[in-house]
Image: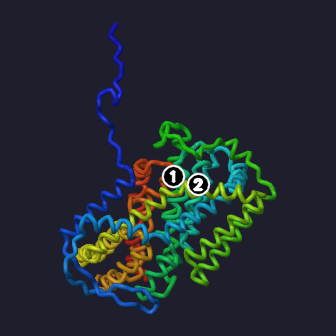
Amino acid sequence: MAEEKIPVLPEETGKKKFALPHIYALLFGIIILCTLMTWILPAGEFDRVTNATGQKIVVAGTFHLVDAHPVGIFEMFKCIYEGLCNAANVTMFVFVAYAFIGLIIATGAFNGLVAGLLRIFKGKTKVAIIPIFITLIGFASSTIGVFEETFPFIPIFVGISIAMGYDAIVGMAIVSLAAAVGYAGAFMNPFTVGMAQSIAGLPIMSGSGFRIFCHICMIVVASIYTIRYALKIEKDPTKSLVYGDPSEFSMSQEEVASHPFGLREKAVLLVLLAGIIVLVYGTKNFGWYFTELSALFMIMGLVSAFIMGWTPNEIARKLSRNFTDIAEACMMIGIARGVLIVMQHGHIMDTFVYGLSLPLASFPTVISAECMLLVQTLLNFLIPSGSGQAVVSMPIMAPLSDLLHIPRQLAVLCFQYGDGLSNILWPTAMAPVCAGIAGVKVEKWWKWFVPLFLLLLLTQMVTVAVALMIGWQ
């Protein structure tokens, strides 16, 4: 009888399994790389002027070399701190939004709503919840530009997805993927489309019809991909990319389905609905931004807590726990901003943008348009801010599109495509933040998302070609 062979575990061979570095280490490595680039790339700048809306924009065709300012080691660390301070408005907003919307989530009202939907969609049809919420969250992102505001909903959808027999990646995707697709297919997002169109000299919110079509195409692709994965792991949980990984948001389907949905929980949902209406109205008519939205979220959270009858100490303890849970993700935002600060100090940001724009002029129109999309996607790695990227790139891309016989409307579409979808891909943007909130290792998120990203990028390239074919203006 042959001797039975005992499998040798990797640990027993002395070989260590490759693992990506911690996101802080990864970001720090990128900062070091950008610091080295300040010693290699020539320093250069565009002239800038203040437009009618008070924005400082680049003047196309004015790129010129300036005195080099390579960033040293000590200055690099100063840039990291400056990045933390520079991103303070974003990080403080995420702190406040997560903590106070977290109060609303803690009431269980959202669980009760999903429980009601699960009673409607039973068995295999419960998967319909995925496209329903991808569409709803995507619509909010597309219209009023919510992204960071969706962070508090990630844990609740992670828990619900696990309870439905799926996994944490599905829950994270429902929220983060919807927000990214909403930004990419936005038709009236004031922070991206509105700003880019104003810089490009186009009527605000023009071209909405085709943008809605593009948004729907991406929602369909994203929903089908997510549904297929969800059904696969429901059938065989070992197929999950996070199989065996513990989740602090785990709950059973019975816990969700039997969750109370009484008068108080319904009143909390009414508060949430009223808050969303006020948010839409204030953003659209009064230009509300982080300060006003933070105040609104505080009011919504506290009113919901009082409806539930919580004492001030209970509210304070819940807020303290929420602040703690989001702290690591907020630090990621600040450290990532250090990449931009290093490039600005070294005067190589404009050099990089100028270098990316040069090859576009040498290609046929269709290829140039597709390359414009790829350039904007790459640029979002360095400038993970929709409005910031618009101010830097659109003054260059808009007149360049004229020279290439590409409609300026299409240049705006390429910008929003490049800014939106890659927000949940690049480590300098929101990918590690969303993964951290969901309790998912970012490398496992990338393993799931990269194939979908390529599918959605192909979808975007097809719609860009269609836009050129139909003469969309």
Please say whether residue 363 is visible from this viewpoint: no
Residue depicted at x 51% and y 49%? 439
Residue located farthest toward the bottom when viewing the structure as drawn: 52
Task: Measuring from the top left, give residue 275's x and y in whole percent.
Answer: 68, 71
Mark number displayed over residue 55: none
Task: Report the front residue among 443 and 70.
Answer: 70
Q: Is residue 144 above or below residue 327?
A: below
Name which residue lies at 36% across and 19% down: 6
**Residue at the spot of label 1:** 226
Where residue 130 is drawn, which disc sits there? 2
State how the image is colored: rainbow
Q: Position of residue 144 (x, y in %)?
A: 57, 74
- What amino acid does circle 1 point to? Thr
Give the residue at x 53% y 77%: 188
Above or below, 373 against 235 in this view is below
How packed is label 2: few (under 14 Cα within 10 Å), some, or many (20 or more)?
many
Quadrant in the rendering for residue 153:
bottom right
Cβ–Cβ under 8 Å for marks 2 and 1:
yes
Please tell me which of labels 2 and 1 falls first in the chain: 2
Q: Quadrant of the C terminus?
A: bottom left
Task: Decide: is 62 above or below 216.
Answer: below
The amino acid beneath tag 2 is Ile
27 or 214, which is in the foreground? 27
Locate residue 437, reporting x and y percent: 52, 54
| Rendering coords of residue 343 (x, y %) | 29, 71
Kind of element beneath mark 1:
helix
